[in-house]
Image (tube, helix red, strand yellow):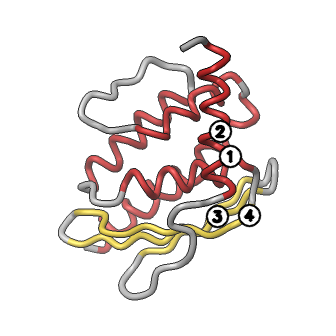
Amino acid sequence: MSFSNLDTLYRQVIMDHYKNPRNKGNLDDDTVTINMNNPTCGDRIQLSLKVEDDKVVDAKFDGEGCSISLSSASMMTQAIKGLKVEDALKMSKVFSDMMQGKEYEDSSLELEDIEALQGVSQFPARIKCATLAWKAMEKGLHEKDSDA
C-alpha cells in the first residue's frame, strides 16, 4: 500500500471515530471520573473509568473538541477495556512515544486503530489534542490506585 493510500486510510479511521465515537457517555456506580482540558485549542474531556480487580472493565468519555482529540478518546476507551491497569498504563507510554516520534515498542499490545494517529507526531500543536484522553486515563488510574 502506498504512503498516500495509507494516509487516506488513517484519515478515514480518525474521521470514523470522530463521527461515530465508541464509548461516548458517562458511567455511574463506583467509577473514577477525570475532567481535563486543553486550553490551547479548547478541547475538554470527561473520562469515566470502572476498575475492578486491577482491570479496566469499562471506560466512557464525554466532551467537546477537535477530531483528533475526540477520535483519540474513542480509540483509547476501546483499546483499554479489559486490560490490566499495568497494561493500560504501558499502552499510554507507547502512545506517548508514538506522539513524540520516538521508536515505540508495540510488543504484546494491540494498537489497532490507534496507529492511525501516528501522523499527528508531525504536527506539534496537535499532539496535546491526541494525548488529552490518555493523560486523563493515566491520572484516573493513578488516583484509583492511590484510593485502594
Q: Position of residue 80 (x, y in %)?
A: 37, 54
Task: Name which residue lies at 50% across and 66% down.
Answer: 23
**39 w.r.t. 36: above or below:** above
Q: What residue type is labelled 4?
A: Glu
Q: What residue type is labelled 1?
A: Met
Q: Which mark is residue 15?
A: 1
Q: Residue 12 carries which label?
A: 2
Q: In whole angstroms, how far apart are the C-alphas of marks 4 and 2? A: 20 Å
Relative to 11, 133 lies left or right? left
Q: Which mark is residue 45?
A: 3
User: Mark 1 and mark 2 in contact (Cβ < 8 Å)?
Assistant: yes
Relative to 25, 50 lies left or right? left
Q: In whole angstroms, how far apart are the C-alphas of marks 2 and 3? A: 22 Å
N-terminal label among 3 and 1: 1
Q: Which amino acid does label 2 sit on?
A: Gln
Task: Identify the secondary structure beneath mark 4.
Answer: strand
Task: Identify the secondary structure beneath mark 2.
Answer: helix
Q: Quick one: which residue is furthest to the right in this view?
A: 41
**Label 4 crowd (10 A; few <14 / some 14-19 / many >=20):** few
User: Mark 1 and mark 4 in contact (Cβ < 8 Å)?
Assistant: no
What residue is pinned by disc 4?
64
